[in-house]
Image: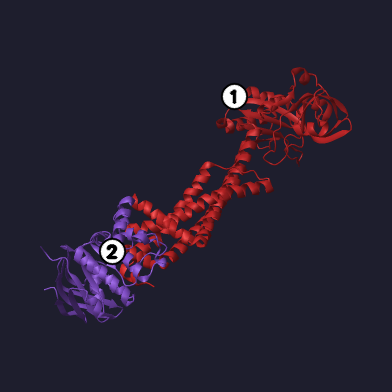
Amino acid sequence: MDPLIQVRDLVKVYHLGEVEVQALLGISLSIERGEFVAIMGASGSGKSTFMNILGFLDRPTRGQYLLDGIEGEHLSRDELAEIRNEKIGFVFQGFNLLNRTSAIENVQLPLIYAQLPSKKRKEMAEKALSAVGLKERSHHHPAQLSGGEQQRVAIARALVNQPSILLADEPTGNLDSKTSGEIMAIFKRLNQEMGITIVMITHEQDIAAYGKRKILFKDGKVVEDHNSAL
Amino acid sequence: MTTLFASLRIALRALLVNKMRSALTMLGIIIGVGAVIAMIAVGSGAKKRIADQIASMGSNILIVVSGSSTSGGLRVGAGTVPTLTVEDSKAILSEIPGVRSVAPHLSGIAQVIYGNQNWSTVIYGTIPELLEIREWSLNSGRSFIQQDLDGAGKVCILGKTVADNLFGGIDPIGQIVRIKKVPFTVIGVLNPKGQSTWGTDQDDTVFVPLSTAQKRLFGQKFPGMVRVITVQAREPEVMKTVEDQITDLLRQRHRIQPGQDNDFSVRNLTEVASSAEESAKVMSLLLGAIASISLIVGGIGIMNIMLVSVTERTREIGIRIAVGAKGKDILLQFLIESLVLSLVGGILGIGVGIAGTLILSSFTQWPTLFSVQAILLAFLFSGSVGVFFGFYPARKASLLNPIEALRYE
């Protein structure tokens, strides 16, 4: 079976007015199903740009990227949205929940765009909230939840569509160390028990330690790729 | 369908979050729709009044007025000197095939006295055909009979206004009134007809037989003459032909040489009235157009608020796009929002328009007329304003770059 993620000679160049910024300078790697990868690197190392490309939120300037055998290069904006909806779950540093919308409705958001009927949506959202241990708080609004709880709602939203991959961009960046530990425990459990592939950006060593594989970015290149599972 | 319903819920929630802002935005549409409905109601009310007045004049009517004679270099205005005769009117009826009916008349202003009451009014000496042409029916009593006409009978028929002012609650039929010291027996009272196109009270009048008017009231100086002949043509299409034929016939009968001026003039009343109707139509169009401008201004208000809303909710849009919203999902969400604003505004505007019109007409006594079509049109117009002015902000939202939108603070 092909790897879940295949990246070859990926280059990304931004144009900020006259200035040309080389964010990625030829990345090549592959990620298998069921891996838990931590991507590390200083700010400006290109790790966020790489995540955006992995998440089909951005397109590479050159090179090839295959997710589950799908290449995004020639797909339209709407087709990419469909792939994100079906195959990718996002967890952001700032949670990015909709305010004034209850937890369960936040979790249902991807299902609305998957055009599922409301009964089915509710069922799946409840299941996802149970998986992160928030079933009893499903009708609370984000403002009524703690940071850790908000991030757990965000994880439930990322999971609800049963995606092939979960992309987490500094998921514990806004949380204290105890809550961070709880969130990472959830990630670990999802990875081990449900076999969900996780790619996570972090700049904290102890958070990265939860991953089975560590990739270090520097100046748009992979300088270290260490797989502790092997 | 699922998305549409979900989009509607999202839109309603977003609007309810900023209640004050939504209400103020809607106010523009409310005023616009209200103004359109009120102005169309005023315009069509005016149009209907004119149409009613035209109908009250009778249809296909030509008026032949005597006068405009030139004798020895002295020119006299129309109607001042009677130059028409009863024989002229008989000739018009018998010789012109397009004529259905004719009614010669002679009129003057005189005081009518009953007991200690008096009332100055216009006295018409005529024949019953005049009432038939003008489709004017009797409320009580009878019309003139041949005997009254032949024998210059001292009988009269009163208009509603005269009857009310002289008799109050008493039944006028059979009572004696005096006109220029001549006693007349009241034989009938007419149904009310209301205002004429030029604003006079048509019911403020008294009818007497033509022969009586000629011999006893106004005709002594010019025996056998009449001032006006009212002619009714058979159908609207022959009006012009009949007008020309009357002119030819009367020139011949009055022995007017070619090159000489007519001693009468022929007027087409329907033409006068329809030009009044035309100007009312133009006025109501103009009023509607001005009101529509306020509706468009309201639409610009919607666009303004939707643009602010899109900017404020950039992050929300970014989240939606990241989890799989397509361009059309976002477009629909914001389009529905502006559509809800404009349609709710439209519904409230219909209420405001109707209420405003009723208040306006009760203060000014203007006639107003609501039409379902006008209300529906205003409502649909407000909806299309919502779509039109909501489209640009919605499209802007749908084209946002998700990475930048997610980073937006």
Identified at 42% across, 58% down, the residue is B390
Identify the chain of the residue marked 2, using the numbered disc in the image: A
Mark 1 is on which residue type? Pro
User: Which quadrant of the view contains residue B335?
Assistant: bottom left
Chain coloured red in the rendered structure: B
Vertical order, B32 against B315 (above or below): above
Relative to B381, residue B51 above or below: above
Label 2 crowd (10 A; few <14 / some 14-19 / many >=20): many
Q: Position of residue A221 (x, y in %)?
A: 18, 79
Camera-side residue: A87 or A135?
A135
Point out the residue furthest to the top here: B147
Q: Quadrant of residue B157?
A: top right
Residue A95 appears in the picture as rendered? no
Q: Please state if A155 lies on the left or on the right of B87 as rendered.
A: left
The one nearer the camera, A102 or B404, is A102
Q: Which mark is residue B163?
A: none
Where is mark 1, residue-wise?
A: B97
Dot 2 corresponds to which residue? A158
- Residue A152 appears in the figure: yes
Q: Amino acid at mark 2?
A: Ala
Q: At which x and y percent is residue A105?
A: 36, 59
In the displayed structure, does residue B51 sit left or right of residue B343? right
Q: Which chain is purple?
A: A
In the rendered image, residue B102, in percent from the top left (x then y), is placed at: 67, 26
Mark 2: secondary structure: helix
Q: How is the image coloured?
A: by chain
Instruction: Write down the chain letter for disc 1.
Output: B
